[in-house]
Amino acid sequence: MELRELTSLAGVSGGETEIRNAIMKELEAMGVPFETDIMGNVIARKGDSGPKVLVDAHMDEVGLMIVHIEKNGFLRFWPIGVPPSVMVSKRVLIGKDKVPGVIGAKAIHLQEPRERESVIPANQLFIDIGAKSKEEAEKKVKVGDYAVFDTEFEELSPGIVKAKALDDRIGCAILLDILKEDWKGIQLYAVFAVQEEIGTRGARVAAYRVAPDMGIALEGTVCADIPLADKDAYATKIGHGAAISIMDRGSIPSKTMVAQIMKLAKEHNIPVQYREATSGGNDAGAIQAAQAGCPVASISVPCRYIHTPFAVASLADMKAARDILVLFLRSVEGGFRP
Amino acid sequence: MKDLIKKVTEAFGPSGAEGSVREVIRKEIEPYVDEIRVDALGNLIALKKGKGGKKVILDGHMDEIGLMVTHIDDKGFLRFGNIGGVNPFVALGQRVYFENGTMGVIGSERVDDPKDLKLEKLFIDIGAKSKEEAAAKVNVGDSCAFYQPFVDLGDRVVAKAMDDRIACVVIIEVLKRLKDAPHDIYAVFATQEEVGLRGARAAAYGITPDVGIAFDVTRTGDTPKARTMEVSLGGGAAIKVKDSSVIAHPALKNYMVKVAKEKGIKYQMEVLEAGGTDTSAIQMTKAGIPAGCISIPCRYIHSPCEMVDMGDVEACVLLAKALCESSLEF
């Protein structure tokens, strides 16, 4: 499935139905067997002997949830993984019917000087769907509906794409892609996880079910190679290859897995970079903690402006992440053990 | 026991890189246990078989706080992230060492107001004159520990990584002294406690004990103008009532007190307001495990100069041994 389609589908944490159905349909078309669990994770299988390797990408994206409808038809919402600084003046699509709305605020003419200089907190923002009353609004949306940002997928320049939800549909795209290959010396468990953005909750139960011998999280990750940023604090750089984690708040990757990834990258000329930051966390932490534990690693694609209505990423980095993942898994087939 | 404390505290082992300290401990315990294994998270798990009694975990974590290199700049300075709770005021001016022997010192960018001293302002200088020279010695992702030799002050001793190597020493001593215990004693030298009790969680799941006893350091309230805390250095083994991660199993806690009284072992009660321990990870295993903790009083925790009292250490060994020899019916 193309990244364009994967990123266009809705799937805010806990409301992954649309993206999940599309992924299941794709797996059916590919003839890949899968199961689902009580949380909504999709667990696809390939290979039936050798070590159990769980490769995870999360389906959910950041977004908003409608928490209240005002008498005059405006919607109040709560952010899910999105900072308030990036929400004003954005277009959103609400619920499964994709009701269009805009996040408004007082015009600059009416703002006090101090208001112009400060970030408006989420609980003072609202969505305007053009409804004139609560009753009219309730015909189109209800409390508990999710909203996603209305962001079009675009190729800004050859190989550099802009889209919403690149974190982590870029991981889902890679995961679907490697399921096209034949896997023999490993039992591959491809987990399309729910609810990563609100605490790696889907991966936790999926990993418990699988009880893998090792785990790999595929991610869209932080990237600050932008003007005015300290170049010693970029974390990752677009166009410099797949980002390999050294540590984050959720896990410390297996030293032997990381060394194997770096060795294979060097031997096969796959561009890779270290993720030069220790902040953030991903599903690797949940996978590592499952049952009696397992070694983990994270392979990521750098995404600028992550956790905002759009991110920018390089297709070459995505290919590098895919290629190094395949090489690593082949090496496990060939006998590599962490 | 001081020689053992020196050996174990001076071993290298920030969270996630416990290989060196694990080998030091493995050599110490090998003659005294029946089985040894290393699990998927790197925990060193040793079984000293009993006579069909309970499965008992004695847990102490091997890992220490440290720093991880996140970036090497063009001039060869290293930027880092913290492994566990590292205070920038404590870190500034310290020496650090890497597993391959590379040494470095911690310097700071210009900071006009001390309040602005954050870890992001600090860097490690390994004496390299260029990025290439630095990269020949260390890699992004390498971790380092504070460098401070063990110091013997008489009744009290000072070292880096007393948190939690002193607990490892207590457990090693118990394994050495324990003869014919009724219970299967699983000594768990756990990894990654400082970053979230991760090793103990996996180990406890793998073992599924009947009883869990964690050993960790706890702070004291006996230094000048210290924050209130009943525990004092030299006050004996500290029996945990609670910390911010766990309420010790009340019956097990009371049983520890009973055994200490019966055996005349000096003890004090510990209520720790901030800080978590492996006790919590063990307690939350599967459908729940009765878990408690014996704490070793320690001053200057999470500094390279952590101080313990030898009398307290001995009291902890005696209490742990007495518990292992008792019925553990509580």
Image (cartoon, coloured by chain):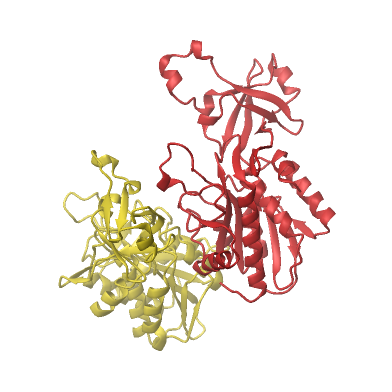
Chain colours: A red, B yellow
Quadrant assignment for the N terminus of chain B: bottom left
Q: Is residue A166 above or below residue B33?
A: above
Instruction: State the image coordinates of residue A116 (x, y, percent, origin top left).
Output: 45, 19
- Count of numbered tags: 0
Horizontal arrangement in the rendering, residue B235 relative to residue B330 (left or right): left
Q: Residue at x 18, y 55 (%)?
A: B223
Instruction: State the image coordinates of residue A143 (x, y, percent, origin top left).
Output: 67, 29
- Outermost residue, top direction? A109
Q: Residue at x 23, y 71 (%)?
A: B150
Viewer-closest of A167 and B27: A167
Q: Is residue A183 visible?
A: yes
Instruction: State the image coordinates of residue A178 (x, y, percent, origin top left).
Output: 72, 59
Horizontal arrangement in the rendering, residue B206 relative to residue A42 (left or right): left
Quadrant assignment for the C terminus of chain B: bottom left
Viewer-closest of A224 and B306: A224
Instruction: State the image coordinates of residue B144 (x, y, percent, origin top left).
Output: 35, 63
Horizontal arrangement in the rendering, residue B148 relative to residue B141 (left or right): left
Q: Is residue A51 visible?
A: no
Horizontal arrangement in the rendering, residue A72 relative to residue B89 (left or right): right
Q: Is residue A148 above or below residue A166?
A: above
The quarter holding residue B306 reads bottom left
Q: Residue at x 27, y 40 (%)?
A: B115
The quarter holding residue A327 reads bottom right
